[in-house]
Image (tube, grey):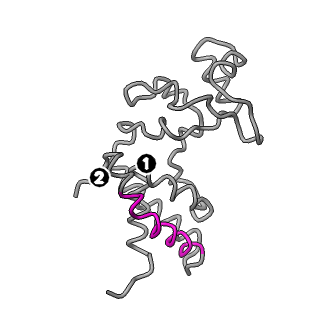
């Protein structure tokens, strides 16, 4: 079965499911499964979904989610663009606020062109990791996952598969 990838449709479906998604978030935080068991299920669904959806065709994350640039990201991209780190920061980034990294000055990402990243091989680590479904400790990133359901078709489908597989069963 072909998975929905149209970002407008995904956004509408995520909005329609918002209450159920937040309720499932609460359920996941208190269910009998361990964090490791939940991670294994998320990783399984992520593998299956990402085999069916070409992540790099969408580009929606680059339009609405701003990565945080660490110093090594700044230096890598500045070298690629043949400018100084200071020039890169001045031209593209806001000041660092919380020690986590510097956000972009504006969205969409200035390196997005026709749904493609023009600095893909040098992209920031935050971008390399998105949508973060391969990581451990999914249950500690549930707010992010629910929010990302309306942004990323892969997250939307993984979360809904997880909900269908282990969510509380309702009597009909």
Q: Residue 78, image x and y in percent?
A: 63, 18
Main secondary structure along the magenta-highlighted residues: helix
User: On the rendered structure, is 67 left or right of 172?
Assistant: right
The answer to whether 168 is drawn above or below residue 98 in the figure is below
Q: Residue at x 59, y 40 (%)?
A: 126
Number of marks present in the image shown: 2
Query: Within the image, what quadrant is residue 36 found in?
Result: bottom right
Is disc 1 placed on a helix, strand or loop? loop
Quadrant the C terminus occupies: bottom left
Q: Nearer the viewer, residue 129 or 168?
A: 168
The residue that disc 2 covers is 4
Q: Residue 120, image x and y in percent?
A: 48, 28
Quadrant the N terminus occupies: bottom left
The answer to whether 28 is drawn above or below residue 106 in the figure is below
Q: Which portion, as a residue range, is magenta?
A: 13-29
Q: Residue 91, image x and y in percent?
A: 64, 18
Q: Nearer the viewer, residue 162 or 14?
A: 14
Q: Residue at x 53, y 64 (%)?
A: 39
Residue neighbourhood size for the residue with mark 2, other residues' Cα within 10 Å, grouped as few (<14), some (14–19), many (≥20): few
Mark number displayed over residue 152: 1
Question: Residue furthest toward the top?
Answer: 82
């Amino acid at each position: 079965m072909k998975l929905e990838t149209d970002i407008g449709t995904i956004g509408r479906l995520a909005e329609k499911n918002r209450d159920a998604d937040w309720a499932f978030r609460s359920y996941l935080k208190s269910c009998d499964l361990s964090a490791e068991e939940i991670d294994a299920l998320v990783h399984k669904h992520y593998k299956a979904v990402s085999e069916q959806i070409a992540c790099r065709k969408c580009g929606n994350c680059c339009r609405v989610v701003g990565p945080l640039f660490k110093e090594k990201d700044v230096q890598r991209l500045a070298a690629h663009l043949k400018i100084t780190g200071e020039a890169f920061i001045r031209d593209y980034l806001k000041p660092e606020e919380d020690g986590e990294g510097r956000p972009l000055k504006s969205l969409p990402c200035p390196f997005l062109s026709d749904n493609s990243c023009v600095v893909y091989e040098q992209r920031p680590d935050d971008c390399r990791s998105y949508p973060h479904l391969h990581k451990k400790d999914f249950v500690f990133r549930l707010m992010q996952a629910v929010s990302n359901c309306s942004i990323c078709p892969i997250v939307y489908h993984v979360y809904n598969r997880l909900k269908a597989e282990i969510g509380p069963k309702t009597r009909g």
